[in-house]
Amino acid sequence: QPVLAVVGRPNVGKSTLVNRLLGRREAVVQDTPGVTRDRVAYDALWNGRRFTVVDTGGWEPDAKGMMASVAAQAELAMHTADAVLLVVDARVGPTETEEAVARVLRRSQRPVLLAANKVDDERGLADVHSLWSLGLGEPMPVSALHGRGSGDLLDAVLAAFPETPREVFGASGGPRRVALVGKPNVGKSSLLNKLTGEERAVVHDVAGTTVDPVDSLVELDGEVWRFVDTAGLRKRVKTASGTEYYASLRTKSAIEAAEVAIVLVDASQPLSEQDLRVITMVVEAGRALVIAYNKWDLVDGDRRRQLEKEIDRELVRVRWAERVNVSAKTGRAVAKLAPTLRTALESWDTRVPTGRLNGWLNELVAAHPPPVRGGKQPKILFATQAQTRPPTFVLFTTGFLEAGYRRFLERKLRETFGFTGSPVRISVRVRE
Ligand code: GDP
């Protein structure tokens, strides 16, 4: 989701305006004693579009003086945001500080909006003209206190954001899409038959929807699911001519078309390279993942112990994925698939509110700061969840974060927020 950075001198009414933009849905974070409230990020929603509002903090003079501090804030805003909002007190007019900031902002590639605050009534409009001199385009009169002009401002903010890619799957897009994948002979056809036979409900037509003939609609646990690209499995036409390359393409396209994948492996055989490749495909495609160990009826004590070792050794990367031990032959645990799929999809859809995310992150980073690199201590400024499906987080930092530390963050993120069954992505935007 796009980021709006709000910058402005103390007392121009920046915090009041931020509250106004948020519709006060997310209360302003109270200052925690001992923690400097440097920057805070909030979720905002306007006209159905979500974005993040970052309050870059007050322009207090630091050791290097007021100008340096202000310039640093403006730089930060430019490097972390998709659009910048400069708030000026229209009654005071542009000060030297704001002129300096405007110079920095004009050089940036980012869209900049100029809010002329404290225009509480018609008379105040006369003050607005002087702000044209900042060279940031038309000043937008607002009264953060009374709410005047804030709707127009929000419209302008949304219009300023770059087009963001539409989410691929609609929230209300009918049955959830499942890929049933795995190397040949792990029992995919058998499992699909079991699922459809058991429930006696291969739904061929759901009122009003046309079924793509390559998919199967299957009712599991009171819910209809769309198993994608199952034509080959259903017909049981084992194309002897099907090369491995072709099979792998099929697998890939099924995963792409799905929201969640069940990777079926043969529990009676040692886990192979090919099994791991399919799992990797799912993770790289960013789909939710369930690992189903099939042919569990053939697993004895010895094999079981061996299998646990394999899991420890080979599947650490996907420790977050739930495993189900099933048998397509006997029907064992097949009923567990639906709840497992639901959990994975729920994680995949999860959105962590920005306030909560940053509260958690501040505490974590205070206790475990990122390792020093090249003599410098990278600072994590704030984080936002940019996307769901899968949950994707963006960290704004002052320096590169080592892979080990990123893994640590992911582990902690999972400990706190769950994400069972879903990959999680963390990207880092370093402020130059
Ligand atoms: P696919 O290539 O993944 O679709 O695998 P199939 O469904 O064609 O199954 C391959 C072979 O494994 C067949 O001989 C099945 O009868 C057998 N099979 C599938 N599931 C099970 C299971 O749970 N237990 C046992 N013992 N055999 C199974």
Image: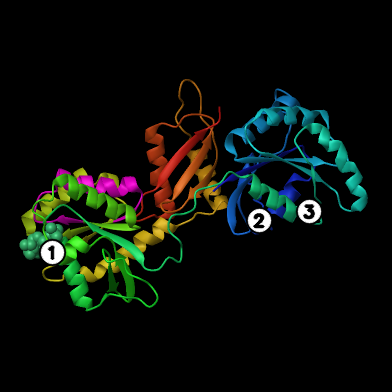
Distance between mark 1 and mark 3 Cα atoms: 64 Å
Q: Residues within 10 Å of mark 1 (few under 14, many from 20)?
A: few
Q: Amino acid at mark 3?
A: Gly
Q: Which mark lies nearer to you, 3 or 2?
A: 3
- The numbered mark, 1 or 3, whose residue comes first in the sequence reads 3
Distance between mark 2 and mark 1 Cα atoms: 58 Å
In the rendering, at what x and y percent does residue 240 appear? 8, 53
- From the viewer's perspective, tell me whether residue 97 is left or right of residue 122: left
**Magenta span:** 264-289
Where ligand 1 lies, by quadrant? bottom left
The residue that disc 1 covers is 236
- Residues 196 and 304: in front is 196
- From the viewer's perspective, tell me whether residue 330 is left or right of residue 8: left
In the rendering, at what x and y percent does residue 215 appear? 27, 65
Which residue sits at x=37%, y=68%? 175
Which residue sits at x=39%, y=48%? 424
